Image: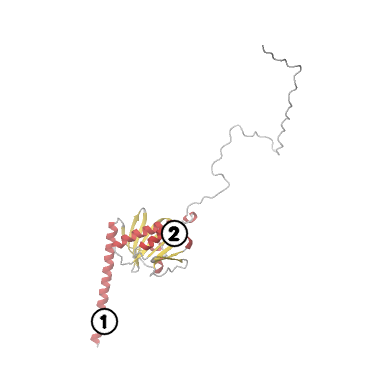
Amino acid sequence: MVPLWFTLSALCFVGAAVLLYVDLDRRRGLGRRRKSWAKSHGFDYEHESTDIIKRWKRGVMSTVGDVTARNVVLGQIRGEAVFIFDLDDVATVIALHRKVGTNVTVDMRLKDVKEPRESDIWLLGAIGPRMVYSTNLDAARRACDRRMVTFAHTAPDCAEIMWNEGNWTLISMPVTSTRAQWDEGLRTVRQFNDLLRVLPPVPTAATGQPVARRTGSPSRPLTPAPAGRDLPPGPAGPVGPPPRRPAPQGPPPPRSGQQSPNYQR
């Protein structure tokens, strides 16, 4: 009986070692593929980062705790920053920076994905195979036009969750996604970002830029008075009433004598 238990323990140990080796090899293989893909697009690659994921709290970010972003790709698309990274074994995230931020969040996810965990976001409705949630239903309803409906039907299934947050638009994909799906994810996040431009922008005061205020001062300099029109200095005291104008004179008196007639020859 003892040899049997010893044999089973040895088999379990060997199986665990094999699984650990397979997992490490998979992670290394994913890192090599991500690095090669980044190089083909002219992007930079980092093995891991603990800072970038602190920028977002919604979407798939609300389902993970204190994790580290791995296989991080940093680049630019049309002059805007883009990040691609893995959240351990949870998901692969693509984040694209927005030129104009907004306080309205729109979350579009597949119907078989759990609803958002945030308490300040509500269900707007279903568009094709996806459910739409937002923190401002009126603004999100205006954004869900015909183009958004077409996009919801044609977006790839690998983009499981799509949402925006502040100055970023993000999508989450399965961690087992391929190089072709990463390319497709880049196109999808760009399209979703363009459709969300109709959302109200962040107020100017919230962005830290100076806000113009109306005051009593004129908006342009006053024209100086012409020379010679300055009032001469006079004695201090109250100003009296203006002088009266002289009364108009009547018509001149008629001339004496009669007017001589004019004769024509």
Residue 11 in picture, x, y percent from top left = 24, 80
Q: Nearer the viewer, residue 29 or 144?
A: 144
Q: Residue furthest front?
A: 265
Q: Is residue 222 above or below residue 8?
A: above
Q: Is residue 253 left or right of residue 53?
A: right
Question: From the viewer's perspective, is the residue at label 1 or at label 2 nearer?
Answer: 2
Lower sequence index among marks 1 and 2: 1
Label 2 amino acid?
Answer: Ala
The image quadrant that residue 72 belongs to is bottom left
Asked whether the viewer can see residue 38, the reply is yes
Q: Is residue 115 above or below residue 207?
A: below
Q: Nearer the viewer, residue 163 or 254?
A: 254
Mark 1 crowdedness (10 Å alpha carbons): few <14, some 14-19, many ≥20: few
Mark 2 crowdedness (10 Å alpha carbons): few <14, some 14-19, many ≥20: some
Name the residue that disc number 1 marks: 9
Label 1 amino acid?
Answer: Ser
Q: Is residue 250 left or right of residue 112?
A: right
Q: Secondary structure at mark 2?
A: helix
* Label 1 to label 2: alpha-carbon separation: 60 Å
Q: Residue furthest bottom?
A: 1
Residue 166 in picture, x, y percent from top left = 43, 59
Q: Which quarter of the rendered picture does the N terminus lie within?
A: bottom left
Residue 109 - label: none
Name the residue that disc number 2 marks: 143
Q: Secondary structure at mark 1?
A: helix
Residue 101 in picture, x, y percent from top left = 44, 57
Residue 75 in picture, x, y percent from top left = 33, 56
Asked whether the viewer can see residue 50, the reply is no
